[in-house]
Each structure stands twice: as structure tokens, then as C-alpha cells.
Amino acid sequence: MSTEPYISIVIPVYNESANLETLYQRLTTTLDALGKPYEILLTDDGSRDDSVHILQELHKRRPEQIRVIEFNGNFGQHMAIMAGFERVRGQIIITMDADLQNPPEEIPKLVAAMEAGHDVVNTHRLERQDSWWRLFVSRTHNRIRAWMMPKLKMQDEGCMLRAYSRRIVDLMAATGEATTFIPALALNYASHPTEVGVAHENRFGGESNYSLYGLIRYNFDLVTGFSLFPLQVFTLIGMGVSFFSFLFVLYLGLRRLIVGPEVEGVFTLFAIMFFLIGIVLLGLGIVGEYIGRIYQEVRKRPRFVVKRVLEK
């Protein structure tokens, strides 16, 4: 087998000790059957279970093909993928999760699409095996995202089984952004993207690493990283509220001249005031999200800290 890989698989790992052995067996079986040189980069994102030791053992089994990146702490899924992107050697780079909800057996579909001339292959999950509330949240968010960012052509943003050309990966790795959303970033650079349907399975073992807060943060990164839509919406809301407030002041002034002083409507005025204050605070929160991203970027701190790399 050639020493120069043709396919690179990049997998972030966080507390996935229950899945790694099965992932290894299914992934290597699928890639061996393709008959093309490959490498597997697994990034441990500060796992607190036995994942690191299992990854070290997997590297010993196939040191030529399995490379392990160990982070000094927990820096997030997308930074774990970026660490792999900075070290890939292949021409076709495929990302996937370690929980086996993305079946490794679907990888040949992505390779075929890449070899057909596409530079980005996005995917959408067929017959999803998630709980009803996750399905509801995912579908609702996909619709809102499509409305807010119509140029971002992506049917299912939550599926991480995707393929990219080496050129696209090099461009993404060179951005140096402290926070990003990789599938959206790839589409910004793509010239000939496509999308394919892939199978979806129940999590093989362990528990999901995405809490409700994590999902909220994930969505903030997507929206604030690739759209000014929230700021534009609140600009329009501010203009509308200012216009109607001016009309309301004129109405109250005329009423005082015609009817005279009165105390009726005090609680209505309080309700309107609280409503307007709520809008202001929500707007400040959105502005704060954008300012926070600027703050993270201008500090120029490392996006992640690599503790050790196991490779041959």
C-alpha cells in the first residue's frame, strides 16, 4: 500500500470509550474494502473517560494508518476537526462522529461523489433514529436557518459525515478563526458542492455529549459566524418601534390637550415600557454575541492546545 494516503478520515473524540473498538472494526473494514490508501486521524478533545488509552492502543495496531491527536483540554468538536485538518495528508477528507450514528459503511458514497468532480459533499440523514424532541428541534432549526441564511444550501446541518477536497480543507485550516462552523465555512469556499442522503443509526454506546446549552452555543456560532441577519432584524425592529412610539407620543399629547390630565392607562404604559425594555435587552444580547466573537478573535489566543501527536 502506498505511504501517501488518498483518503483522510477525521474524527473528533470526547468520552467515546464505549464506541471506539467497534468504530475501529467497522471503519477499517470499510476502508480496506475500498482498496485505496487511507489514514484515520482521531482527535481526543480532553476526554475524561478511557478514550485516550484506547486511542493509543488503536494507534499501536496500525501505526501507519491511525494517527492520534491529544488535546490539552476540551476545545470543542469543530476545533478537534480543525486540528485534524491541519495535519491531513489525503486528497479526499471525510469527517464523521465517533458515536457510530454516522455508519462508516456510507463512506464509499461520499468518495464516489468526490471522484465525480465535487469539492464538497454534504449529507442529510435518512430515517433518523433520534428522539422525537431532537427531531423537532433539528427540523425547526433547519427551517429557521434556511430562512435566515438562504445562501447556505444545506438540508441537514447536524450531520457531520461530510467530504471535502484537500483545497477546501487547506483554506478552512488557514482561516485561524477561534470559533466556526465547518460545513458552512466549506460552502463559502466551494465551487461545485453536492449533497447525498446517508443512513442514520442509534448511538452505539455512551451518551450524547451535546447538552441543551451546547446546542444553543452551537447555533449561535452558526448564526453569528455566517450572517448579519439578527442585527439587521433588530435594526428594522428599532426603526418600527421608534416610528410607532413617535405616533403614540403625538396621540398622548393631543389627548392631553383635548381631554385634559388623566391617570387612566398608567398600567398600559408600564406594560409597553416593559415590552420595549425587553426588546432592548434582547438586542443587546445579540450585539454582545457578535462583540464576543470579535473579542475572541482579537486576543489571538491559540484555538486549541495539542498535548501530543501519535503518528509514524
Image (tube, rainbow, N blue to C red):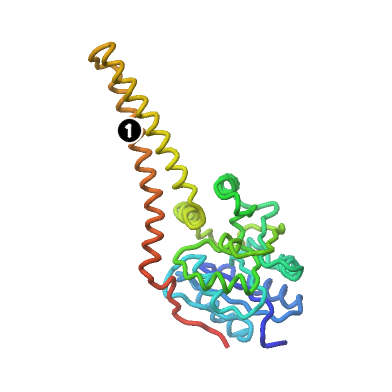
List x then y, in percent, for residue 75: 44, 68
Residue 186 position, x and y percent, is 59, 64
Residue assigned mark 1: 274
For residue 138, say whether it is visible. no
* Any part of residue 254 in sight: yes
Residue 238 against residue 124 in the figure, above or below: above
- Asked which quadrant contains residue 112, the reply is bottom right
Q: Secondary structure at mark 1?
A: helix
Kind of residue sitting beneath label 1: Phe
x%, y% of residue 114?
72, 69
The residue lying at 50 percent from left, 76 percent from top is: 52
Q: Residue furthest left?
A: 261
Q: Within the image, what quadrant is residue 298 found in?
A: bottom left
The residue lying at 32 percent from left, 31 percent from top is 273
User: Where, by quadrant of the figure, is residue 20 drawn?
Assistant: bottom right
Q: Position of residue 125 (x, y in %)?
A: 67, 55
Quarter of the image containing the C terminus?
Answer: bottom right
Asked if 12 appears above or below 126 in the picture, the reply is: below
From the image, which quarter does the N terminus lie in? bottom right
Crowd around label 1: few <14 · some 14–19 · many ≥20 (10 Å): few
- In the displayed structure, 288 sits above or below 14; it is above
Q: Looking at the image, which residue is at 33% across and 37% down?
A: 277
Drawn side of residue 278 relative to residue 184, left or right:
left
Q: Residue furthest top?
A: 259
Q: Nearer the viewer, residue 222 or 128?
A: 222
Left or right: where 186 falls relative to 284? right
